[in-house]
Image: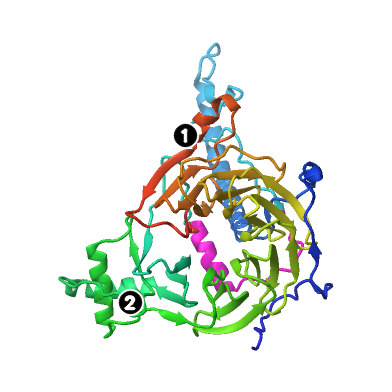
Amino acid sequence: MSTVVLEQPSAFAEEEEPITITGKPPDIMESLNQKEIQWGALEGSLEDKLEDKLASQNTSDKAETAEAGGANASKSQKKASVDSAKLPPNKKAKKDKASNVPGKAGKNEPSGSAVAVMRVKSTIPLPNLSEQAEKKALDELRKRVKLSPTALPNSCFYTFFNTYNSLNCVAFTDDGLVAGGFSDSSIKIWDMAKRSAVAGQSQEKATDVQILPSENGGGDANANDGQAGGKDSDAVVEAQRIAHGQKGRTYALLLGHTGPVYGLDFSPDSKYLLSSSADCTVRLWSVELNVNLVCYKGHNYPVWDVQYSPLGYYFASASHDRTARVWSMEKYYPLRIMAGHLSDVDCVRWHVNCNYIATGSSDKTVRLWDVQTGECMRIFTGHRGTVLSLAMSPSGRYVASGDENGTIIMWDIGSGRRLAPLLGHTDCVWTLAFSGDGSLLASGSADNTVRLWDATASTVKAGKLEDSRKSRLIKTLPTKSTPVYALRLDLAIG
């Protein structure tokens, strides 16, 4: 199998062999969690570039305003001198009260400046985004809407029909691509943007038509706004099939694995798809060509999860062999092996600055690893069940984890402290996602609900802990009878 040749920096050029770092014994866990960590966001990231552009724009606007204000001020001074000359000798001109009261600001002026997010440099060579991808992402960030408990995002559910409990994982992009991994070792990709366009043209012909099951029971993806399905949406899907002149496959079918597919993740530019399987391999697929490009081998047991780094090129995998591994797209062997968990590594997530990865395990712990050295930097304990999901806050300071009992815990990476748990789910928490500004945390569960939490609420004393848990739950979004496997918040959402 040929490897992918990309114009990217060579990864970890000084290391020829993978590094294995074992875990730390419990008696020195406290000292381990006191290690210094650069938890800030990535320096030179898209958000950083957008802030610089907005700052320079504001500076130029202020300069223009100052010039206009100077001209107006000179006119006002001349007028004031003329008016003061007309006043009686014992009468004083009125003063502007607002301008002379110390510590007061106008109603529309902020009382203080916002706290800047800490930025750190990456310790590993990172790829450069293409101009087209960067421009698109910056345009999305400019449209970002601020979220709060009183300003919540709209929700759109993609529901898979006729899967017969064979759907194991889901991944999707902002462009409308939806991928599903199945127990029959297949991967299916739907382009919901094209399907919606066809549905708009064919909706008038969609009356009195029923949806047909897939030929191989692989399931159909369907988009719904705030609900899990319905007769109208079924009719639209069938209308799309009729418009295409077929009643069969309306998706791209990817075959190559020899075991159930347990993990999927799209690259940041949506050109590639990674998949992990029970056949102990990770495969790289071309979304445009629908072909397998590379097969990465190294794990000795099933691979439960896989995720791209925030900028692509690198990715991490989690396996039943109790290890997590860091790879690059152009090398078929792992660059780092993180060993130390006492049981399966069930999930893995990259830190926003690409210097660390977090892993969740069946040993009920969450660990943070240094990508450059392979060293374990944090061990978070507190879960009472298998950790199934992880999410990193955009600031890089917090990591959220969800377990099989429905408990969600937020951790402070800098101090290693455990924050107040988020209780409300009654079954496994399969997926977690932060909003763009980190103020909101969304969770999807096997209890058929999506819950929105206030991630900015501070912890309180033990006596008021129960009130804190209730106040941090903002809203519950139920499906009809469908567990939620994956969540994604759009870049344009706060």
Rendered residue at 53%/25% (across/down): 98
Give 1 or 438, whichever is nearer the viewer.
1
- Residue 108 seen in render: no
- Residue 420 seen in render: yes
- Label 1 vs 2, first from the N-terminus: 2
Give the residue at mark 2. 214
Which residue appears farthest toward the top when viewing the image? 90
> Dot 2: few (<14), some (14–19), or many (≥20) neighbours within 10 Å?
some
Q: Amino acid at mark 2?
A: Ser
Give 79 or 31, whichever is nearer the viewer.
31
Rendered residue at 72%/59% (across/down): 355
Quick one: SS at disc 1?
helix
Quick one: SS at disc 2?
loop
Give the residue at mark 1. 470
| Residue 161 vertical placement versus 429 (above, below) | below
Which residue appears farthest toward the bottom when viewing the image? 2
Part of the protein shown in magenta: 120-142
The label number, if any, that marks residue 327 in the structure image: none
Question: Horizontal and vertical percent for residue 255?
Answer: 50, 83
| Residue 112 vertical placement versus 137 (above, below) | above
| Residue 235 vertical placement versus 424 (above, below) | below
Q: How many marks?
A: 2
Q: Amino acid at mark 1?
A: Lys
Lateral position of residue 176 relative to residue 432, left or right: left
Give 53 or 312, whichever is nearer the viewer.
312
Rendered residue at 64%/65% (across/down): 320
